[in-house]
Amino acid sequence: MCDQTFLAITFGPCDSCSENRPLMNLYIKTEPINYCSLCMEIMACQGLASGETLKSLKAESETLRKKLEEERKKLHDVELEKVAEKAEALGELNMKTRRTLKGHGNKVLCMDWCKDKRRIVSSSQDGKVIVWDAFTTNKEHAVTMPTTWVMACAYAPSGCAIACGGLDNKCSVYPLSLDKDENLAAKKKSVAMHTNYLSGCTFTNSDMQILTSSGDGTSALWDVESGQLLQSFHGHSADVLTLDLAPSETGNTFVSGGSDKKANVWDLRSGQNVQSFDTHDSDINCVKYYPSGDAFASASDDSTCRLFDLRADREVSIYSKDSIMFGAASVDFSLSGRLLFAGYNDYTINVWDVLKGTRVAILFGHENRVSSLRVSPDGTAFCSGSWDNTLRVRQEGRGVGRELKQGGTTLYG
Amino acid sequence: MTIRTLRDYGQHYRPRMACLKNVEVFVVEMQDPKSGVKGADQKLNVTIIPHVINGQDVLAWIVTKMKVTTEEAQAFGTMLVAYGYIYPLQNHRKLVLVPDSTLYRFQTPYFWPVQKWPAEDIDYAIYLARRNIRKKGMLEPYEQQHYDNLHKWMNPKWDFIVMQATEQYKANKERKKPDRVVLDCQERAYWIVHRPPVLTFDVVRRTNIFLTQALMRSAVKSSVSLTAFVKFVTTHHNHDPFLTTPVPSNPWITDSDEFWQLNSRSVDIPTKLSVERWVLSFWELISDPRGRVDFKLFLKKEHSAENMAFYEAAEEMRWGAASAIPEKSQFIFNTFLKPGAPRWINIDGRTMGLTVKGLVVPHRYVLDAAQTHIFLLMKKDTFYRYLKSPVHKDMQKRALVPAPHVFTDAQLEANVRNRNPGISPILQWQQEEEEKAAAAVAARPIDVKAMVATNKLDRK
């Protein structure tokens, strides 16, 4: 699928309006056409042609859907468990909390790692956004947002800025400075403007663009410097709760999950919805790409996590257990993609074996729901933020046993 | 995104509690007189309380029923208490399941957090009426339609509905603003799902457009893609710190950041593990900053450095600021694309034609076709030559295998106290920008005329 999005014509003169624009690859019957997003909208909103009724259009939808199911069924020749038999079994995993970051006065809602593998930005319900050096547990910067419920925060790839937003319907970028006393709020830049709360934000491959998702049902790509809307993505019928950018060499797609139980894959350039998956039974709280970029995992309120294969265009695995009845709030993969870490509303974190579909470990420690969970960029540890106001960095605990109490943080080895 | 327990029995939506129906089934089983948890009458102070259960029995029952460890059963039991399905008789503020003789009782279903009442029309009418009270004309056209319909056939109950709506509106006003906003969002989302807007023809059309392109998009056989996953996991097994202990040591465990220092961008000799990772794919090679440096060195020897330079310049334009696009596109055209350019890239005529034409009105994706061509060229040809080259083979030989750390307890404690604060990413970024600027100056073609003018070539 990566190679496909690669080779398709994506920029050039639109077949309808002849303007040079990013193009969507569409089909009328089986004829390929390249329309820009505006012309596609015009085509969709055209008045009913003679002989067409709402009923006939709906009937057409049904036939198309059935045909698609048939086609996909033909390609479905093996299950993941069968293929995974070749993979060796995992040894026992013994995770321990290595750092506990205390300092937020209220529920931690979101967190993100910096590319330097040790710094973290976290946001909480009381409007505070803190940048920590998780390795030394020092707080490096703190910003107070003028809004509460800061549900989204992100670290810029360069490490020089952070972005955050929530109930204020905006995404604001704060450039960080080396001067500890500087008031970061002075240099704040309002980038995104939505008509409802901001549920997720992430920088793309540079500091200059931000991708946001919002409760108004849309996602959007913004230019940071000018605050200009570069592309918007419409297609969800309810709030968009989460998004993730593809790590593939093309870096042209992203996946979003929403309250309408759907996970949609979008082309960043043209705004086209290229794939859609709707097998979940409830809101999708978090989506994350597999490290190779050919699949993604989702966590939902129906207490399951699922793996979706992008190349075969279907769901391949469900990670669930009868004893897990509470919604999953956040997921992330380990570096090799073998482990899937998921944080749940019953205060626990379950670690799943992605290939075999079994649970490898269950981790306790948080005293309230785990709201966000991310593996560090080099995979050396993962951090979980929770409604108990703390963040915990955890790693495999082979070996050394010592305990040292230092100030307000407790370290376990 | 829910806020804490809101006990407001007028509003029946609980969108985030969808999974609790499984919990309820479980709790009902727990109360079964034959196979459930054994309860007894208990004397507390002077009163005798019926159907009292103790924590230990509850825990044992969960362990047997769910077939889980005691720890997990304890966590689940605490959830039951936290959500109010079981309440403690004595220490009623501490909502935890204590596995001893602490006494609990089952909560009556009326007070359960989710009342399984279907999305009734009456609730919808109250919701719409309340929104109307808040702001006239706030209803969407389809909602207005629903409202008019409900008003027609629910006319006798209308007074009750308006009264309920006013009550709820007043109760809402007493909440804190952010809580109110959150609740509004939840309620709205609930009703969007349970009373979805009627499909208009343009929505159906869009679905059809989506389905047609989905049909034409070729998909891959499951066996192929799933095998690819297994392959990816296997090849990356040694690089995953959760599966293979990193050498010299994981910084989070031993508090020594040597692992990060040895893998940094500017290190002279990379570790063997890094070099092995570069071999896995072209993308892994250029994603690792140290790998990219090595690759560029190889390209310089091959005198094909313009490919990588073009790729990087195109990436910068694509992800950069909108205001910089005209300037960047001009620079790229002059340096890489125009006939006789100093760092002319070799791409096929058609792509070159398309690109040059597009550059007349530059857009951030105008270089996509050319960039793709160059990337594929590097991936399918140059990369393999790099792997066979002396630059790479030499690096493989020289690569370090750091010895694993063995710290004594005392040393570990010292490490904790002396954790290296490292370089701030801001400083690192500034350094990298300076290096890039210097490299750009060095790469500029030498202007012979200017040198002559300043007498640099004069040999006198």
Image (cartoon, rainbow, N blue to C red):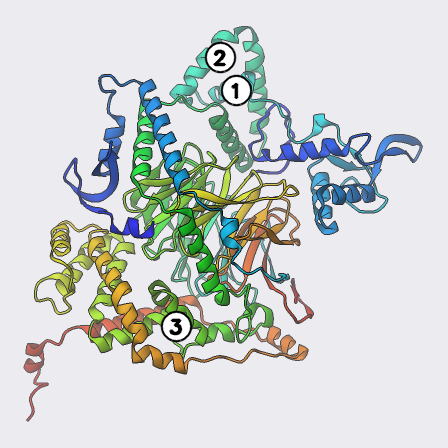
Q: Are marks 2 and 1 in contact (CB under 8 Å)?
A: yes
Three-letter amino acid code at the position of disc 2 = Leu
State whether residue B379 is above or below residue A72. Answer: below
Q: Quadrant of residue B93?
A: top right
Label 3 to label 2: alpha-carbon separation: 67 Å
Q: Residues within 10 Å of mark 2 (few under 14, many from 20)?
A: some
Read off the chain for label 3. B
In this figure, which residue is indicated by the disc labeled 3? B265
Q: Earlier in the sequence, mark 1 or mark 3?
A: 1
Q: Element type at marker 3? A: loop
Q: Nearer the viewer, residue B61 or A233?
A: B61
Residue B96 at what x, y percent from top left? 74, 44
Query: Which disc is residue B150 wearing?
Result: 2
**Farthest residue toward the right?**
B46
Q: Earlier in the sequence, mark 2 or mark 1?
A: 1
Label 1 to label 3: alpha-carbon separation: 60 Å
Three-letter amino acid code at the position of disc 3 = Arg
Question: Which label sits in the foreground, 1 or 3?
Answer: 3
